[in-house]
Image (cartoon, helix red, strand yellow):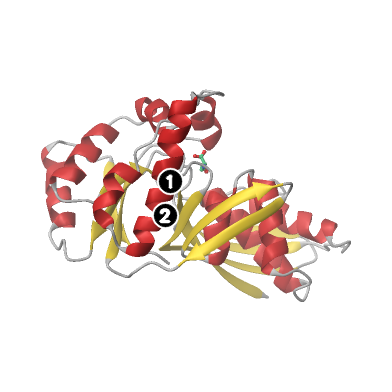
Amino acid sequence: MVKVKIPATSANLGSGFDALGLALTLYNYLEVEEYDRVEISSADAVKIPQDEQNLVYKTVKYLYDVCGRELPGLRILQTNNIPMARGLGSSSACIVGGLCAGNELMGRPLDDEALLRMAVKLEGHPDNVAPALLGGLVTAAIEEGEVYHVKQTIKDDLMFAAFIPDFELRTSKARKVIPLEISHKDAVYNLSRAALMSVSLYSGDYQNLRVACADRLHQPYRLPLIKGAKDIFEMSYEFGAYASFVSGAGPTVMSIVNTDLFDFESLCNARLGERGMDGWRLQMLSID
Ligand code: HSE
């Protein structure tokens, strides 16, 4: 039996659409073993598919097939702390968890690079699966199936405030609202900011982050799908956040906050209460 721990992730960081992502201190856990049948259960109250449509199962099966190995059956026990369809990488956690568990069960035939290539192929973009597998802040680009990536170490003086609403937003729906083409001017707007985001997180030039997370590729089109998000953005800046952005495809809004901003959490919670925004909860996280 193997046990796997997989972090939540926040992709895009605003301007780095499908390129930047970071892992957070919120985890799903898997216990997986070969079995004489398929038996999938949840260790908590979270409802998960318990048949062969389960994404962890499908991923393990895929890996066995690719490696030419017969999967007899599988017993999976899932602990899901990452909320689903909230822009925190829950499906990536299933894919990365399934690949890591399957690889362990087979005696590690594949290295991390091969697992990453496979994870990107299954997920379609690298910005959740790469940090879920490698941890930290990861910048990635895909070229002919290869994943070119760098994991950056950033200082431990940042907190990530996840404002998580009580409604879901499917990534497929949030990707459909994005225009297929953008102007050269908007492309320059985004690439300059994505580069600034990556390097400013690394250098500690946090005063750049607010400008760096602005984008014209996806957030303007997704924000109308996220009721209350604009209020969260305004509130987070009022209470001193460096930057706020739609986490992945949304609907979670992520704010980057200095660790010395001691009252950020209580001020935000009080304001959410005053405004009757009970559907939003705030979870303070660090980078994994
Ligand atoms: N980069 C992806 C998106 C992340 O924004 O659609 C969502 O999983």
Among the 4 quarters of the image, the one containing residue 57: bottom right
Q: Quadrant of the image for the N terminus?
A: bottom right
Q: Which residue is drawn at 65% across and 74% down?
A: 2
Task: Using residue 77 as the reference point, say whether residue 121 is left or right of it.
Answer: right
Give the CA separation, mark 2 to mark 1.
Answer: 6 Å
Does the residue at mark 2 contact the one at mark 1 (Cβ under 8 Å)?
yes
| Residue 216 visible to an observer of this rendering | yes
Foreground pick, 26 / 36: 26
Q: Residues within 10 Å of mark 1 (few under 14, many from 20)?
A: many
Q: Residues within 10 Å of mark 2 (few under 14, many from 20)?
A: many
Foreground pick, 71 / 8: 8
- The residue singled out by tag 1 in the image is 194
x, y percent for residue 151: 51, 64
| Residue 45 visible to an observer of this rendering | no
Q: Disc 1 on helix, strand or loop?
A: helix
Task: Using residue 157 as the reference point, say whether residue 246 is left or right of it.
Answer: right
User: Under 8 Å from ligand 1: the CB of mark 1?
Assistant: no
The amino acid type of the residue labelled 2 equals Ser
Q: Disc 2 on helix, strand or loop?
A: helix
Q: Quadrant of the image for the C terminus?
A: bottom left
Q: Which mark is residue 198?
A: 2
Foreground pick, 240 / 202: 202
The amino acid type of the residue labelled 1 equals Ala
User: Under 8 Å from ligand 1: the CB of mark 2?
Assistant: no
Q: Residue at x 53, y 31 (%)?
A: 175
Task: Using residue 126 as the reference point, say whether residue 146 is left or right of it.
Answer: right
x, y percent for residue 259: 22, 65
Q: Is residue 187 above or below residue 213?
A: above
